[in-house]
Structure formats: structure tokens, C-alpha cells
Image (cartoon, rainbow, N blue to C red):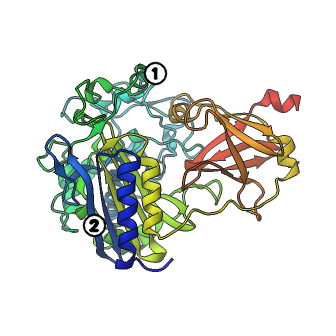
């Protein structure tokens, strides 16, 4: 690709306008940074449907889990100052917090929390396993310290460092550690370490409604969808839509702000991108930033990896670092940075809906001036064809498998003609999707063949004799083949 210039803007604008139309989005805002400068920023659609306010790059957005990258920077600033180490143990930093479970809590370190490998699940204990999001969202603005917030403690389900599982509560603990180390509120820490040095004047982590916040919207939920979304009664309001389908969502609070409570505008986030492109200048040492954006968990080089909070993946053939952010009630954000090209962008959507996923991918491709990668013409390995079909399930762990259950459940690989089909128990692939070899130098890497401009990938794992015994999915999920089926095959 070439550097982003004004010549790219007409096509990018067309793609954004088309996304508004194709996916019936209320609004979106985009900011593109090249070599440290905001080179393009624009809003599309409406920030406020009822008030007929047009979206702009100055409107605030609840950026959700992109907050985690800022939390990680604050942690690394304390590492730079010598107050912390990546191998500092959590039981020593939070001695009043109790731990339970089969995993060894004494092994739990800062690095494990930053990489989602601490053995912590989507619910801190089994008490709320059937409805884990009840402890992620609340109608209270009260912030409690860790022992008060987790009176039953935190369950370490599996030994730290042995399994990847996205853990909001792990980042909540990092926030507790920051408050304790710096002896001031988290809002002041973020202000002093991130927002003030970068002149992000319209950003904070106070998690309060704001006059300049674009309202969030959602669409009508079925009874099943409500059942699967914790505390949905607080945000999925049964009000009439403000247009033909969009219902204004309720403002629901996050009791662990370090995991996702920042509000910011696309204009401010462009300044954040510029700092990240400059290897964290003004926040952390360059060496510390380099440590943050190298893979700390990447079971296969063709799949998404994890640095210290940052997600690492190839997008349209270009290595990227970044994070997504979603807030119940109606906000979705995407941060994507391409360091080799000095390029980054932020996308803000005021909609709680999966339709933002293909829109995000299409717009990112337009920023890169990229076209979808063709499916490589690679022959199917006969050993994979013979031994891959079967049922796969994630490694044991009820708490650490919550998101797997939500997104896919078990995976079935089936033969169909001369090829293979992947079928999930639930989610986007429940009707089945063909998979094809993705790399002529790696017969284990496969691409899912669907309409997405950014198709997902999987990689098969093998026994010592070469037979398939498991598969890896993007975001570090490892699945193993059903042992009974292996014995019967």
C-alpha cells in the first residue's frame, strides 16, 4: 500500500456512506492518522436520531475495552518507574483479596492479567456463571475496592499461563493495583498519565453521562437475546424506536472502570493513535512499548496474537495492533494501527449490533486501499482430509469458556465432497461454512470462506504421528478433538 493521502478520501467516504446505508447504522465517526497527523476525520449519519444531530468527530463515544490499552500503558509507566515488574505477584499486590479454584493463585502475575492468561473467567466465581454479565454492568455509580467488589473472592480456574481467556475482571484488578500504587483515583491517574500529556481534552474515565456523548442505540431483542445478555433490562429499553428500528439504550455503568469505562471523541483518539505510532512517547519508555506490542500469546503465527493488552493480527495482509470496544446499550469502537506504514484509524459507531462488524472491516480495508485477499489455490492435505472430521471442544473450564459458549460452542468439522465444512453449535457458523487451506507453506492453516472482507482463520494441531488432534481459533482459543471419536477413528 501507499501512504494515505487526500486521493484516498473520496473512496473512503463512499465506503462509509455505503456502510450507513447497507447496515442501517444510526451514525459513525472516523479519524485517520498518518505519520502522527490527523489527515482525515468525518462523521456520517446521526449522533442523535430524535434530535437530528449529525455525527461528528467531536462527539464523545464510550470506547469500551480500548480502555484496556490505556490501563496497560499506566501499568507499564509504573514498571518504568520501578514500582512494578511484569512478574510481580497479584497476591502480594492485593493481599486482602481472596482467591480460590484449581489454579495456583500464587503464580498469578501482572503479565498474566495484561495478556488474559490468568485463569480468570468472565464471572469472578461460579455464583453467577449462568448470567456472568450481571457482574460487568450495574445501575450504580459506586466504585468499590477489590475485596468489597468481590466478597467471594476471585476463582483461578486453571493455572495462570496455560490457557487464554478474555478476562474483564483481570483488568479490573489492574485498576485496583494502579489506585493502590499511586494513591489517587483512577480518573486522576488516567488524566495525569494519558489525557493531559496527549492533550485529550474531551476524554475521561469517570463513566458519567455527558452532554456531548452520542446516544447509544440498539434494536429490538428477542426473549432469547435478552436471556443471553446480562442485565439487559438496564440498557435494552422497551421504548419505541426513534426511527424505523433504533431504540435509544440506557446508560449502564461498569463497576470495573479499568476494563472499559473511558469516554473519548474520534478527534481525541487521533492524538492517542499518534502517541502509539510514536511508540508510546510521552507515556512510557520506547522499550516498554515495544514489549507491549510483541506477541506474548500467539499459538500460531497465522492467527491473532496478544501483546500486553494489544491485539495483534494481519489485516488485508498488513500487520496491525489495536483493540475493539463494545458497551452494552449502544456503542462500538475499533482502534486499528499499522506501525510499518505509520498509519492508524479509529471508528466510532453508536449502535449495539453485530452489523458493525462487517462495516468495520470494509472501512478498514478502504483506509488501507486494500481489496479482499483471493482464496489461495492450495491442495487439501490428505492427512487432514482423513483425520480432521470430528467434534472439537475447548479446554476444560466453565468460567474460562463462557465466551466460547456464547460465540460458537462445540465445533464440528465435516467432509463435503472434496473439501471440509466447519459447523458451530451456535453463532455465525451454525449453518456451516466451507474451510480452505490458506497458506501453501503451512498445510495446517485454513481460511473460513464467507462474505466477510476479513475472514476468520483456524489452524489444526497434530499428534506426533501427524494425525489431527485439535484446532486453534483466532483470539487464542484452543480446542481439542473428542477423545472418543479419536479412539473410534
| Left or right, residue 122 beside residue 36 | right
Q: Which percent across, then down, holds residue 339?
A: 45, 72
- Asked if the residue under mark 1 is in contact with the one under mark 2, i.e. CB atoms within 8 Å, the reply is no
Residue 138 image label: none
Q: Of helix, strand and loop, which one carries label 2?
A: strand
Q: Of helix, strand and loop, which one carries label 1?
A: loop
Q: Residues under labels 2 and 1: Cα distance?
A: 42 Å
* Residue 302 lies in quadrant: bottom right
| Left or right, residue 46 beside residue 428 | left
* Residue 229 lies in quadrant: top left
Give the residue at x 64% y 60%: 301
Q: 10 Å neighbourhood of mark 1: few (<14), some, or many (≥20)?
A: some
Q: 10 Å neighbourhood of mark 2: few (<14), some, or many (≥20)?
A: many
Residue nearest the observer in this picture, 294 or 366:
366
Q: Which percent across, then down, holds residue 318?
A: 54, 68
Q: Mark 2 vs mark 1: give the one in front.
A: 2
Residue nearest the observer in this picture, 336 or 375:
375
Q: Which percent across, then down, holds residue 284?
A: 33, 68
Give the residue at x 20% y 56%: 203
Q: Which residue is mark 1?
A: 130
Between disc 2 and disc 1, whose residue precedes?
A: 2
**Looking at the picture, does residue 334 appear above or below residue 133?**
below
Q: Which residue is mark 2?
A: 41
Amino acid at each position: 500500500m501507499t501512504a494515505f493521502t487526500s486521493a484516498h478520501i473520496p473512496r473512503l467516504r463512499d465506503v462509509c456512506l455505503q456502510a450507513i446505508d447497507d447496515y442501517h447504522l444510526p451514525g459513525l465517526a472516523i479519524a485517520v492518522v498518518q505519520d502522527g497527523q490527523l489527515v482525515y476525520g468525518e462523521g456520517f449519519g446521526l449522533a442523535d436520531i430524535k434530535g437530528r444531530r449529525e455525527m461528528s468527530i467531536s462527539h464523545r463515544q464510550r470506547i469500551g475495552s480500548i480502555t484496556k490499552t490505556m490501563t496497560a500503558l499506566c501499568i507499564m509507566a509504573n514498571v518504568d518507574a520501578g514500582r512494578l515488574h511484569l512478574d510481580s505477584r497479584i497476591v502480594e499486590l492485593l493481599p486482602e483479596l481472596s482467591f480460590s479454584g484449581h489454579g495456583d493463585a500464587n503464580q498469578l502475575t501482572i503479565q498474566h492479567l495484561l495478556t488474559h492468561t490468568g485463569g480468570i473467567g468472565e464471572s469472578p466465581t461460579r455464583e453467577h456463571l449462568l448470567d456472568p454479565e450481571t457482574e460487568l454492568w450495574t445501575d450504580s455509580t459506586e466504585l468499590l475496592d477489590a475485596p468489597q467488589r468481590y466478597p467471594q473472592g476471585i476463582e483461578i480456574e486453571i493455572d495462570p499461563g496455560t490457557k487464554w481467556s478474555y478476562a474483564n475482571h483481570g483488568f479490573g484488578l489492574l485498576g485496583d493495583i494502579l489506585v493502590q500504587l499511586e494513591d489517587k483515583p483512577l480518573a486522576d491517574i488516567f488524566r495525569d498519565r494519558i489525557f493531559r500529556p496527549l492533550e485529550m481534552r474531551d476524554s475521561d474515565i469517570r463513566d458519567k453521562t455527558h452532554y456531548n456523548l452520542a446516544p447509544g442505540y440498539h434494536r429490538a431483542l428477542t426473549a432469547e437475546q435478552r436471556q443471553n445478555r446480562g442485565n439487559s433490562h438496564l440498557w435494552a429499553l422497551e421504548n419505541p424506536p426513534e426511527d424505523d428500528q433504533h431504540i435509544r439504550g440506557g446508560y449502564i455503568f461498569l463497576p470495573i472502570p479499568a476494563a472499559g469505562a473511558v469516554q473519548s471523541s474520534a478527534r481525541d483518539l487521533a492524538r492517542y493513535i499518534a502517541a502509539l505510532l510514536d511508540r508510546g512517547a510521552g507515556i512510557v519508555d520506547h522499550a516498554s512499548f515495544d514489549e507491549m506490542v510483541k506477541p506474548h500469546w500467539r499459538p500460531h503465527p497465522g492467527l491473532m496474537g496478544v501483546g500486553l493488552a494489544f491485539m495483534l493480527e494481519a489485516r488485508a495482509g498488513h500487520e496491525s495492533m489495536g483493540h475493539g470496544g463494545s458497551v452494552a446499550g449502544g456503542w462500538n469502537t475499533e482502534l486499528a494501527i499499522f506501525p510499518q506504514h505509520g498509519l492508524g484509524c479509529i471508528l466510532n459507531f453508536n449502535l449495539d449490533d453485530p452489523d458493525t462488524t462487517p462495516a468495520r472491516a470494509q472501512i478498514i480495508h478502504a483506509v488501507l486501499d486494500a481489496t479482499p485477499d483471493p482464496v489461495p489455490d492450495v491442495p487439501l492435505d490428505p492427512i487432514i482430509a482423513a483425520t480432521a472430521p470430528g467434534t472439537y471442544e475447548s479446554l476444560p473450564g466453565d468460567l474460562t469458556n463462557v465466551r466460547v459458549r456464547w460465540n460458537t460452542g462445540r465445533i464440528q468439522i465435516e467432509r463435503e465432497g472434496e473439501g471440509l465444512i466447519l459447523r458451530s453449535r451456535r453463532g455465525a457458523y451454525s449453518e456451516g461454512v466451507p474451510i480452505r487451506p490458506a497458506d501453501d507453506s503451512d498445510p495446517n492453516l485454513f481460511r473460513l470462506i464467507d462474505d466477510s472482507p476479513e475472514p476468520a482463520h483456524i489452524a489444526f494441531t497434530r499428534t506426533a504421528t501427524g494425525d489431527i488432534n485439535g484446532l486453534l481459533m483466532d483470539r487464542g482459543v484452543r480446542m481439542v478433538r473428542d477423545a472418543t471419536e479419536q479412539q473410534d477413528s
